[in-house]
């Protein structure tokens, strides 16, 4: 950046502070703005700089491929939708090669024995993760476990104990208008402090890959590199993990989102105890209560969730929930919109019995539902290690490598015998820009079924510049067609 511009900005900032002081001096009795210095001095030593390294090019995480996140897990979706950008932070003026091999972010120490919390997308499929402390020590971190659905990663460093740790707050008590501040490494500038207020709570972004998260919305300035860093309240307690911004430029525009700390700590306890995160499952397919439903059912408003299908043998089915019911409240919490339901169900321990209030034929009733367990996130990394493979091949033109799937893994993924190959690495921009990522399963290439590495090689052999290859890609329980267009060198 031009140094004269930096100087101009510095001068403007000084003038602004002087002006603010003059205004305060002229208005005796006015409430003083909060002083954050005590919070920063106490907590900054527990904030860390996270660096993830990749032997090949950086993985094409669907939520952060090229620094971008589009609705629908990076798969083709509404082209008019605003771009949600993850802070896949990069060092200042990195070389093109370093950008492909390095991811920078933030994190914070949650216990003195070296457990660190950050975002999954900061360290996703990294070959090596290191953290740098405020005293400039650099330590190798082990990834204890990750949960892509909540975008949480739990790291562990061995520093002999007695590390500084943050205090954990209660994100459920947050209210719009409260002061909050962030500490992190935007653009590689370590221990940068920014402040703002809570703009909204319980914000659901309507994303298929994070339906279980009700975000904290703030106006705290955060940018690439802040991802995974802590959000503090005025008591100096962590209430959230800075995770996303909403922008059509890739830069901060005044709207930021943080994962509530109660959601994150619930995931931490599960990652520690069993290596993965369990989520509750109600067993219904729902949709918003739109104007047509309001009119047809003679409702007062569009609050709640309309049930369109009920899974056989699910807790909802056994409790008597039926298509056409309107779910008004879950476990005593009213639903303002359909998107409010998944986060509540996800945080429920499987096996719990929960009261669900419904509206059926104009009459309210409450049913007790035994909550099941949602399917485990197939892309989660836990203590059991990576997915086994027997052979491997790649396509330089498409920018990815694939691996065969053994029979046990195929059963876990719900695939039929001889169905699919799994993406091992994202090695080039074509696959990365399409939102593909390691762990995705390719079941068809140009309408040809694929069940082995050899079949994938045959189907992609001789791909020419300018041509488009259509893949049928499965992620979790959903499949989508993804077109990869090979750049024309002309």
Image (spheres, grey):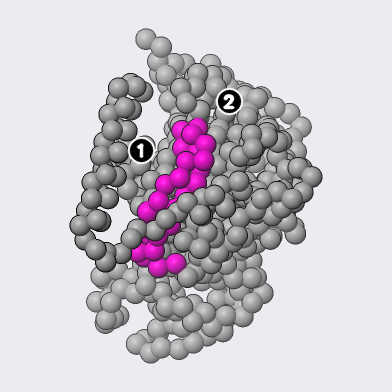
Q: Which mark is residue 101?
A: 2
As displayed, is residue 19 above or below residue 461? below
Place of residue 271 in the rendered image (x, y in percent of width and height, measured from the top left): 69, 55
Asked whether residue 198 is in view, the answer is: yes
Q: Which mark is residue 443?
A: none
Q: Is residue 185 in the magenta section?
A: yes
Q: What's the residue at 27%, 50% (across, down)?
A: 21
Q: What's the residue at 58%, 38% (across, down)?
A: 49
Which quarter of the rendering shows the C terminus? top left
Q: Which residue is mark 1?
A: 251
Asked whether residue 463 is in view, the answer is: no
Place of residue 480 in the rendered image (x, y in percent of width and height, measured from the top left): 48, 44
Place of residue 306 in the rendered image (x, y in percent of width and height, measured from the top left): 39, 72
Q: Residues within 10 Å of mark 1 (few under 14, many from 20)?
A: some
Q: Is residue 95 left or right of residue 438?
A: left
Q: Nearer the viewer, residue 4 or 1?
A: 4
As displayed, is residue 424 above or below residue 275? above
The Cα–Cα distance between marks 2 and 1, rounded to whole angstroms, is 22 Å
Q: Nearer the viewer, residue 26 or 303?
A: 26
Instruction: Say which quarter of the image contains residue 169.
Output: bottom right
Q: What's the residue at 46%, 33% (across, down)?
A: 187
As displayed, is residue 219 above or below residue 100? below
* Residue stretch in magenta: 174-199
**Secondary structure of residue under mark 1:** loop
Instruction: Say which quarter of the image contains residue 56.
Output: top right
As displayed, is residue 279 above or below residue 97? below
Instruction: Say which quarter of the image contains residue 177.
Output: bottom left
Q: What's the residue at 25%, 70% (across, down)?
A: 291
């Amino acid at each position: 950046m031009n140094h004269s511009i930096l100087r101009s900005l510095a001068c403007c900032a000084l003038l602004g502070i002087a002006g603010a002081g003059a205004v305060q001096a002229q208005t005796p009795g006015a409430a003083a703005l909060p002083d954050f210095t005590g919070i920063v001095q106490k907590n900054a030593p527990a904030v860390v700089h996270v660096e993830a390294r990749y032997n090949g090019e950086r993985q094409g995480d669907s939520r952060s491929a090229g620094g971008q996140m589009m609705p629908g897990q990076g798969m083709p979706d509404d082209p008019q939708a605003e771009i949600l950008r993850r802070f896949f932070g990069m060092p200042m003026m990195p070389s093109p090669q370093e950008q492909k091999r390095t991811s920078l972010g933030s994190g914070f120490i949650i216990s003195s024995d070296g457990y660190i919390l950050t975002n999954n997308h900061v360290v996703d499929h990294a070959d090596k993760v290191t953290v740098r402390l405020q005293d400039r020590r650099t330590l190798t971190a082990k990834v204890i476990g990750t949960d892509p659905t909540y975008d949480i990663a739990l790291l562990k460093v061995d520093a002999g104990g007695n590390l500084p740790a943050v205090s954990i707050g209660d994100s459920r008590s947050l209210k719009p208008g409260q002061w909050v501040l962030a500490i992190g490494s935007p653009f590689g500038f370590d221990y940068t402090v920014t402040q703002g207020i809570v703009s909204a709570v319980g914000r659901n972004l309507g994303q298929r890959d994070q339906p279980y998260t009700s975000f904290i919305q703030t106006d705290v300035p955060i940018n690439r590199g802040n991802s995974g860093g802590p959000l503090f309240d005025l008591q100096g307690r962590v209430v959230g993990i800075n995770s996303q911004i909403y922008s059509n430029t890739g830069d901060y525009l005044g709207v930021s989102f943080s994962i509530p700390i109660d959601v994150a700590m619930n995931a931490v306890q599960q990652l520690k105890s069993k290596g993965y995160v369990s989520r509750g499952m109600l067993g219904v397919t729902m949709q918003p209560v739109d104007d047509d439903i309001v009119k047809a059912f003679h409702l007062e408003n569009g609050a709640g969730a309309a049930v369109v299908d009920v899974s056989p043998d699910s807790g909802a089915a056994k409790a008597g929930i039926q298509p056409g019911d309107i779910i008004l409240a879950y476990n005593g919490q009213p639903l303002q919109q359909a998107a409010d339901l998944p986060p509540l169900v996800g945080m429920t321990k499987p096996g719990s019995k929960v009261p669900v209030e419904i509206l059926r034929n104009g009459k309210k009733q409450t049913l007790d539902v035994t909550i099941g367990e949602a399917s485990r996130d197939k892309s989660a990394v836990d203590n059991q290690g990576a997915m086994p493979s027997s052979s491997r091949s790649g396509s330089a033109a498409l920018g990815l490598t694939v691996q065969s799937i053994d029979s046990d893994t195929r059963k876990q993924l719900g695939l039929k015998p001889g169905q699919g190959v799994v993406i091992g690495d994202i090695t080039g921009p074509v696959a990365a820009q399409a939102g593909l990522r390691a762990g995705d399963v390719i079941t068809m290439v140009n309408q040809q079924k694929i069940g082995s590495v050899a079949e994938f090689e045959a189907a992609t052999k001789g791909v020419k510049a300018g041509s488009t290859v259509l893949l049928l890609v499965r992620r979790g329980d959903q499949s989508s067609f993804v077109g990869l267009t090979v750049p024309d060198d002309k």
